[in-house]
Amino acid sequence: MIWRGWGKGPGLVLLHGGQGSWAHWVRNIADLAKHYEVWVVDLPGMGESAMPLEPWNEKTIAMQLVESTQTILKGSFFDLVGFSFGGLIAGHMAALHPAMLRSLTLVGAPALGLPVAKLDLRRWRGIPEGNARDEVHRHNMLQLMIGDVGSVDELALAIQRFTNEVVELRSRSLALGDSLSQALAKVAVPTHGIWGMDDVLVRGQHEALKTILARFNVGLEFIPAAGHWVQYERAAQFDKALRTWLNRVANLRGVNQSAMVSGL
């Protein structure tokens, strides 16, 4: 598993989305690394990481991430953030080994039991490299990842091209159903959700999403004018929302620890 790290401070681990890589967080790292020791992984079978050990599913991948993360952070506590498929894996990590976490943040995560959106995703395989293939990648980004056509810049296109063309793990089937909801029922750490208001995967289902997350005591905030890839499309707003939430968690832990000390 390939990890990249930046910054100093409390540990912060970021998991990217399906058919993605660490680059899903490329517009967030500089800001977050001013406040945290940021670690970003290429999930198994994606980016530059090898395929997961077999037999693989969301739970076995999560356990491999638990073990790898404990090695990277040398057993220290950390905050865990998972985007899309990475949110599914993060939820299972939190259910399997909550003792290592300060908090969990879900970003546009699937597998919560909501109806699956129908998308017009086109095949790029078989199309020669160049403008024609890039147009397919651009189309697919606007179908799934990005809400505003103006946000599909050359960097976003380059990330989409690279991550889709090197991926080995086909993760979409794991993102169906309600596997994340099942995991959240076992999660005991403070948990929060950040979604793009225009995320096509929850279009017309904002209240249903809110109801599902509230069942597990998970707060939810929407960032306006942002699609599924919210942390790229509205990076500054996302970073502010995430840091505000993590500061709340840190303050809560400080209050709880003070109460424990005063009661001794």
Image (spheres, rainbow, N blue to C red):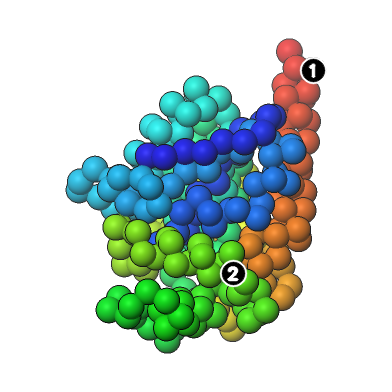
Q: Residues within 10 Å of mark 1 (few under 14, many from 20)?
A: few
Residue pictured at 62% horizontal, 36% vertical:
6
Closer to the camera, 35 or 93? 35
Q: Going by the picture, which residue comes out furthest to the top?
A: 264
Residue placed at 52% from the left, 31% from the top?
100
Residue at x-position 59% and y-position 69%: 154
Q: Determine the image quadrant of residue 195.
A: bottom right
Q: Amino acid at mark 1?
A: Ser
Task: Note whether 57 is above or below 114 in the view shown.
Answer: above
List the residue tagged with mark 2. Answer: 154
Mark linked to residue 88: none
> Would you say 254 lies left or right of 200 here?
right
For label 1, the residue is 262
Q: Position of residue 237 (x, y in %)?
A: 76, 60
Q: Is residue 233 above or below residue 253?
A: below
Where residue 220 sits in the image (x, y, percent)? 66, 62
Image quarter (top left, top right, bottom left or bottom right) of the N terminus: top left
| Residue type marked 2 | Glu
Q: Earlier in the sequence, mark 1 or mark 2?
A: 2
* Residue 227 place in picture, x, y as percent: 61, 73
Quadrant in which the C terminus is drawn: top right
Indicate the quadrant where residue 50 lies.
top left
The residue positioned 61% from the left and 74% from the top of the image is: 152
Q: Residues within 10 Å of mark 2 (few under 14, many from 20)?
A: few
Q: Position of residue 180 (x, y in %)?
A: 44, 58
Q: What whole-number distance in Å separates the C-alpha atoms at marks 1 and 2?
A: 55 Å
Is 146 left or right of 137, judged from the image as shown? right
- For the question of whether residue 22 can be seen, the reply is yes
Instruction: Find numbered disc 2 in the image and state the secondary structure of the residue it sits on.
Output: helix
